[in-house]
Image (cartoon, rainbow, N blue to C red):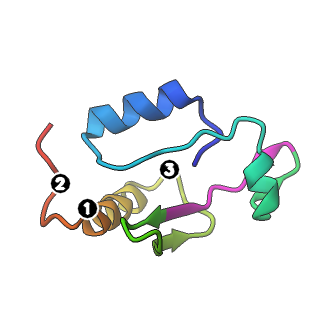
């Protein structure tokens, strides 16, 4: 779930060829329910949810400027999807 537009999330997931569902929360309604909103800005908290509905990975304060953060996120998405390596795009 992201405050990004649904079209942005769709394009990102297609570009990376990631499986799974994504949700858009541009009005931060869900963020507020989970305490992730910080005034006008949203805290970058990342959750990966496996096919069984359980959280398999969580980062509070995701660093969007760190390439290592994205590498770890990709590993978590791949692991949750139950594949040994990312799909080729």
Residue 31 percent across, percent down from the top left: 74, 54
Mark 2 and mark 3: Cα distance apart in space: 22 Å
Q: Nearer the viewer, mark 2 or mark 3?
A: 2
The residue tagged 1 is 78
Q: Residue at left 57%, top 49%?
A: 1
Mark 2 and mark 1: Cα distance apart in space: 6 Å
Residue 53 percent across, percent down from the top left: 46, 68
* Helix, strand or loop status at disc 2: loop
Q: Is residue 22 magenta?
A: no
Q: Is residue 46 above or below residue 79?
A: above
Which mark is first along the chain, 3 or 1?
Answer: 3
Q: In this image, 49 relative to 30: left or right? A: left
* Helix, strand or loop status at disc 3: loop
Q: Residue at left 35%, top 38%?
A: 13
In this rendered view, identify the residue nearer to me: 63 or 19.
19
The residue tagged 3 is 65
Q: Is residue 4 above or below residue 51?
A: above
Q: Are marks 2 and 1 in contact (CB under 8 Å)?
A: yes
Q: Report how many numbered discs are placed on residues in the image.
A: 3
Which mark is first along the chain, 1 or 2?
Answer: 1
Q: Is residue 12 above or below residue 20?
A: above
Q: Which residues are magenta?
A: 40-47
The residue tagged 2 is 86
Q: For mark 3, does the 10 Å Cα neighbourhood hold few (<14), some (14 to 19), or many (20 or more) residues?
A: few
């Amino acid at each position: 779930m992201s405050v990004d537009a649904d079209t942005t999330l769709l394009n990102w997931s297609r570009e990376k060829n990631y499986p799974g569902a994504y949700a858009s929360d541009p009005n931060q309604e869900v963020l507020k329910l989970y305490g992730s909103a910080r005034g006008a800005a949203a805290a970058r908290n990342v959750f990966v949810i496996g096919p069984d509905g359980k959280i398999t990975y969580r980062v509070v304060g995701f660093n969007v400027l760190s390439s290592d953060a994205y590498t770890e996120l990709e590993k978590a998405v791949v692991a949750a999807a139950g594949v040994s390596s990312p799909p080729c795009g």
